[in-house]
Amino acid sequence: MGIVERGGAGTTTPAGTRVGVPWLGWTDGTCAFCTSGRENLCTAARFTGLDIHGGFAELTVADERFCFPLPEGYGDLEVAPLLCAGLIGHRALRMTGDARRLGLYGFGAAAHIVAQTAIHQGRTVHAFTRAQDVASQAFARQLGCASAGDALAPGPEPLDAAIVFAPAGELVTAALRACDRGGVVVCAGIHMSDIPSFPYADLWEERQIRSVANLTRADAVEFLDLAPRVPVRTTVTTFPLDRAEDALDAIRAGRIEGAAVLVP
Ligand SMILES: [Zn+2]
């Protein structure tokens, strides 16, 4: 999230505009994926903070075509999690189709936003966390989840879909077991520990496992329009920019409810 200082040649965004600079920083627009509405899979894609400098910076240069005006009504800190956690979470939610009974495995930044959107859409949301993580379970219930409990145990009802945000492979098989016939397990992380082997019977009856990668600009436009109408409220913990490593440690240790936001 940043404020436009000035535009380069050919840009139209006025100085002073608050924009989001998302993970998807550039695509070629010409490959088979870009030309079929799947620029998130572009083989030449460049990502902010990975291929493009400025992900952790006070000033950055971004391609206007990949930046988005942010909804009014959110403070700078509250709007920041809509970008990464919100956008990836929203694409994962879209991959669950019209699933009515939805499980969220790992209740961090993305899940706390997806839960609100999914409940707004009339879905029943069950949160799954580490068994002993009663703080996250209470946070999930407070946001309107129908239940919250141990991720390795079955939920109170079979699921039509599950989204796995936590990077633990055993959650994929746990989520699969928690799914009803025809259920889909969507893996939303970039990295995950190995998925344990499991009996084919757990996949039988048209259950599916799939992943979600990155985002398209269409996802971003859709979600940034939807979020204020839910309205999605984000819970944030701030860290100074030079303590980014501490923020990552706190996330790994599960010490943060909602999203961590770095402030320069
Ligand atoms: Zn491409």
Image (tube, rainbow, N blue to C red):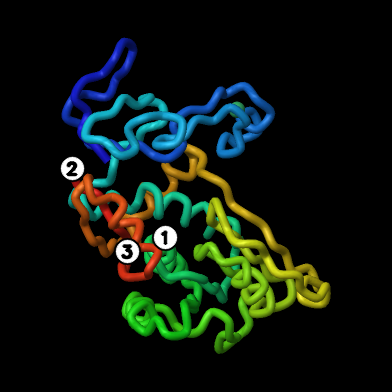
Q: Position of residue 10 (x, y in %)?
A: 33, 12
Residue with the mark numbered 3: 250
| Residue contact between numbered discs 1 and 3, judged by CB atoms under 8 Å | no
Q: Number of numbered discs present? A: 3
Q: Amino acid at mark 1?
A: Ala
CA–CA distance between discs 1 and 3? Answer: 16 Å
* Quarter placement of the C terminus: top left
Q: Position of residue 50 (x, y in %)?
A: 45, 36
Q: Is residue 255 left or right of residue 98?
A: left
Q: Which mark is residue 264?
A: 2
Q: Amino acid at mark 3?
A: Ala
| Quadrant of the image where one finds ligand 1 | top right
Which numbered disc flags the more N-terminal residue, 2 or 3? 3
* Quarter placement of the N terminus: top left
At x 40% / y 54%, what residue is drawn?
85
Q: Is residue 125 above or below residue 114?
A: below
Q: Report crowding for label 2: few under 14, some 14 to 19, many 20 or more residues within 10 A (C-alpha).
A: few
Q: Is residue 167 left or right of residue 25?
A: right
Q: Which mark is residue 50?
A: none
Which numbered disc flags the more N-terminal residue, 2 or 1? 1
Q: Amino acid at mark 2?
A: Pro
Name the front one of labels 2 and 1. 2
Residue with the mark numbered 1: 110
